[in-house]
Image (cartoon, rainbow, N blue to C red):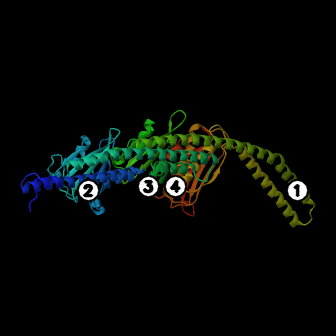
Amino acid sequence: MTDSPDNEEASGLTFPELPKMRLEELLEQLGDRARDVLKAQGRLRALIRANSLVAGELSLRSVLRHILTAARELVGANYAALGVIGQDGVLEEFLHVGMDQEVVDRIGDLPRGQGILGLLIRHPVPVRIPDLRDHPAAVGFPPHHPPMGSFLGVPIRIREKVFGNLYLTESAHGEFTLEDEQLVVALAGSAGVAIDNARLYQEVEQRGQWLAASTDVTRQLLTEGDEAPLELVLRYAAQGADADVASLILPEDTGEWIVRASSGVYADEVVGQVVDLDRTLAGRVIRSGKPAIVTDYQRDVHPAGAISVHTALAVPLLAEDDAVIGVITVARTPDRPPFTPAQLEQLAGFTGHVGMAMALARARADQDVLRTVEDHDRIAADLHDHVIQELFATGMGLQSLAPRIRDADVQSQVLGYVDSLDATIRRIRTTIFQLRSGKVGADGVRRRLLEVISEQSTALGFAPDTDLASFGGDLPDALADDIVAVVREALSNAARHAAASTVGVHVAADAATIVVEVIDNGRGIGDTSRLSGLSNLRQRAERHGGSLDIGSPPGGGTHLHWTARNRP
């Protein structure tokens, strides 16, 4: 039975009179469109998830890793990489996912930004390439590199400045599409915001750490903490900058600059080294008086450097007249990210606080020395006015009793006591002379020697035994400088070459001669030609009419004996 037209209208179903094949084609197209819509919705949801993942982190390293993972999954790429562009226009950092560590190790050095990668650096716009091998800018892959065909590159911008580039290769669908490009561009926009937020958060955190470090260093310097001042400053400098090594470089009386203290990796290798002012970052800062930063130390500063350092900061310690009195350097090994200008600024601020704290600590030490001298004078007066007089009276009394004693043995014993009292009186008088001679002239040689010995204790790992004589008055500036330089050089040699467990410093002076002796129980002087400082010490002695002798004490080790005429 056939429905009438009235029945068709009543049912609400009408079909145009089209061939059956055409109707099927339209239905298939409709289904394809629906599937495309669902696919697009799925990819948009994936983009939203990726943005949420990236935006949910505050750690910069984690943000960069999330960007790579999200981009790779978003467009179905086998490999993803993110290159951070340095100030010199090359890649200073290169992060990647998708490649086994074994393959990475075989490839060796990471890319610097040549070929296709450099094309995106020079022209920061999205780039899609069906096959990398056919592009004219391609320079080929290094040995052991896996083959790569399709390529998609998108710049990441932070406030209109290109931070780096996102690289995707080997699409699972053969080639990357325009839709893939649009999705990655959208992700890169969100990534720029997330990176900026993470960097700002990181800078705030670092500023807080530097402020806490400055406060703690100042407190400990002014309260005489247990830790040595130089080690304390370097420990906080390395901690605040998240560095692998930190060093303090100070000038010598000879005009050379020496690595006086170091912490972290390579510390044992650099302490005591003379700084090459022409080929080091520290030399650049010493001459300019300005902080400096390098992101590739071996390439930019010291191509032949023996120490494997990638990025470094150097900041001068300035005196009140802005003269450079020292340099603090911090560095990272090649597997670490480069320092930023913000970190250089933070280290400079910390160094400024440290300089003020050290100046205050030195002023306080000078006050302590003055109080000690005053105490010495008081003690000397008491010994002279009371103790010696009482001992002398006791000795006189015993001596007057001796002739009345009939027993010869007892009489001899009493006279022996009298001799002992005389010897005690002589020792007390010597002590009084030393106490009253504590403030020897304006040059403050004793204080300078004590400062040098304290500084060198860090390199030695222990405090030397010290016996410093008075000098009986002011010394010529040249002689005072040479005495201090001799002690510093001798202790530095002991720290670098002797491997000693004890070191003694003895300085004696009379009206004619000054004698400096430094004795250690180490492995001996060995080949004296290796120690360039010895010829310098000999010259210092000879220009004051003295001499230098190097020997070995009976128990082994090194005995340095240096003399000079006390007065011209």
481 to 43, vertically: above or below: above
Question: Three-letter amino acid code at disc 4?
Answer: Ala
Residue 79 got which mark? 2
Q: Nearer the viewer, residue 460 or 64?
A: 64
SS class of the residue under badge 1?
Answer: helix
Residue 399 got which mark? 1
The answer for how far apart the CA atoms under marks 3 and 2 are is 36 Å
Residue 266 got which mark? 3
Q: In front: mark 4 or mark 3?
A: 3
User: Which residue position is annotated with label 4?
Assistant: 495
Count of numbered circles in the view: 4
Left or right relative to 527: residue 179: left
Q: What residue lies at 54% left-to-right and 41% top-to-bottom?
A: 353
Q: In front: mark 3 or mark 1?
A: 3
Left or right relative to 343: residue 45: left
The answer for how far apart the CA atoms under marks 4 and 3 are is 16 Å
Res 156 quadrant in image: top left
SS class of the residue under badge 3?
Answer: loop
User: Of marks 4 and 3, which one's residue comes earlier in the chain?
Assistant: 3
